[in-house]
Amino acid sequence: MADEADQTAERMEYDDKINRYKSRKDEPDIKQPIGECLSCGAELSSRRWCDADCRDLWELENRT
């Protein structure tokens, strides 16, 4: 039988998973261009990033 510490740890893990899921739902859909570079904010019309460096930096900063 699980003791109180085990139950608390399991509940914390569950809450953490729920919070990660909720934060992903609130993220913008990055499949479509949004009019600016997702990394530096430069104005763009048909791309998500200015160049490969901005893309790589954004991906590094947004890893989960």
Image: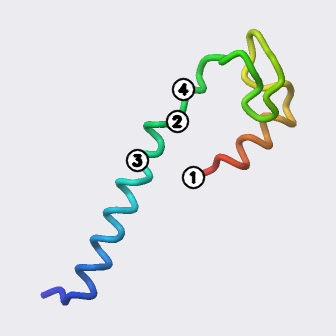
- In the displayed structure image, the side of residue 20 where residue 50 appears, left or right: right
Label 2 to label 4: alpha-carbon separation: 6 Å
* Label 1 – label 2 distance at C-alpha: 12 Å
Q: Which mark is residue 2?
A: none
Q: Secondary structure at mark 4?
A: loop
Q: Looking at the picture, how far across and down is residue 36, in whole percent?
A: 75, 21
Disc 4 to disc 3, how far (Cα)?
Answer: 14 Å
**Sequence-first disc among 1 and 2:** 2
Element type at mark 1: loop
Residue 59: x and y, percent? 71, 42
Relative vertical location of residue 53 with respect to residue 1 in this rendering, above or below? above
* Precedes in sequence: disc 4 or disc 3: 3
Q: Residue at x 61, y 17 (%)?
A: 32
Gap in angstroms between the C-alphas marked 3 and 2: 10 Å
Q: Are marks 3 and 2 in contact (CB under 8 Å)?
A: no
Q: Closer to the observer: label 1 or label 2?
A: 2
Q: Dot 1 corresponds to which residue?
A: 64
Q: Are marks 2 and 4 in contact (CB under 8 Å)?
A: yes
Q: Which mark is residue 29?
A: 4
Amino acid type at image mark 4: Asp
Q: Residue furthest top?
A: 45
Q: CA distance from mark 3 to mark 1?
A: 11 Å
Label disc, if present, on residue 21 of the rendered structure = 3
- Image height check: is 49 above or below 1? above
